[in-house]
Amino acid sequence: MIKLACPVCRHELDGVTYGCEYCPQFVGRLVDDVPDLVVPHQLLDPRYTFEVGRYDDIAAAGPENYAGYAATKPEYRARLWSALLKEQAEFVDVGPGFGMLEEVEQDKRWLALDLSTGFLNRLKDRWPERVCVRALAERLPLATGSVPCLVADSVFQSIVDREAFLCEVARVCDGLFLFSVAYGWNYPRRPQQGFDVTWNDERVVLRRYLEELGFSVEFQWINLDEEVQVLNRDSGDYVLIVCRKESLS
Ligand SMILES: C[S@@+](CC[C@H](N)C(=O)[O-])C[C@H]1O[C@@H](n2cnc3c(N)ncnc32)[C@H](O)[C@@H]1O
Ligand SMILES: [Zn+2]
């Protein structure tokens, strides 16, 4: 069962408390009905300020006015992901954006995390009863081992510290971890930092890293234009990385 936890000390939160009783330096805030579980000093980093501003602008524009959104084939991607989530009763979505996946997965329990309150408020308007939390992918406000399934569609390329994200996923996830990268959009937007994934070597670098974190890894290359799965990245423009945590017991 997915459990929220303090992003500083990992103390479990009850879903109602927006601060941590053990961390005076971390005071959760309620922002437009969306609990803010971001460690405050992280947001002083200009790299995050930049991402927050950029994504809040996109959220404000709305999918209908965000140029190029249709070309990212959101409905098709949502169908692909939905098929992979078939066996799952609940999942955490890191970076839900406009909530395409949430739209098709209303029968499941889902929890959405994003750094943009713009996106989260849209989701909250649409699904007031769902848990939407402002947080960073690099510092997940989730209890260790409490997440049976975690997804991040087209988010990895804009994460400031990708290594921290993967380590956090390995900490909280006790099952399936699905993430993707679209080669054509959003990438590379800036020199790589932190975890320097050389995309030419993704099958080696990323696989090895994820395996060291305890996941088995499978790559699925997709051609979004033609909406088909392809044999390798040369004929695709999107890769889905399906990771499964092998149980230690
Ligand atoms: C390219 S959009 C993808 C949205 C949606 N998953 C989709 O595929 O249509 C990236 C999303 O990740 C969020 N995001 C980017 N960097 C993040 C970070 N470091 N922590 C949390 N969310 C982040 C953005 O606010 C945005 O919602
Ligand atoms: Zn704490």
Image: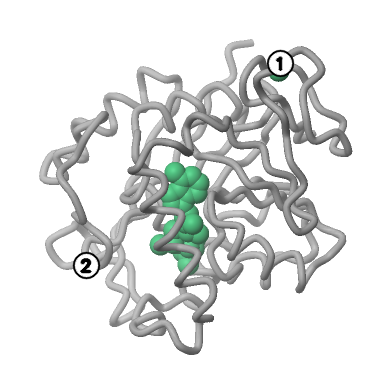
Quadrant in the picture for residue 210: top left
Sequence-earlier tag: 1 or 2: 1
Within 8 Å: ligand 2 and the Cβ of disc 1? Answer: yes
> Which residue corresponds to mark 1?
23
Element on which disc 1 rests: loop
Q: Quadrant of ligand 2?
A: top right
> Relative to 77, is 161 on the left or the right?
left
> Which amino acid type is marked by label 2?
Gly
Mark 1–mark 2 CB contact (< 8 Å) = no
Question: Is residue 178 visible in this depiction of the protein?
Answer: no
> Relative to 197, is 55 on the left or the right?
right
> Which amino acid type is marked by label 1?
Cys
Which residue is pictured at 64% across the width and 46% down the height? Answer: 92
Where in the figure is residue 156, as x and y percent of width and height?
37, 47
Where in the figure is residue 120, as x and y percent of width and height?
65, 60
Which residue is pictured at 58% across the width and 71% down the height? Answer: 100
In the image, residue 242 sits, relative to residue 248, either above or below, namely below
> Which residue corresponds to mark 2?
184
Quadrant in the picture for residue 204: top left
In the image, residue 132 sits, relative to residue 76, either above or below, namely above
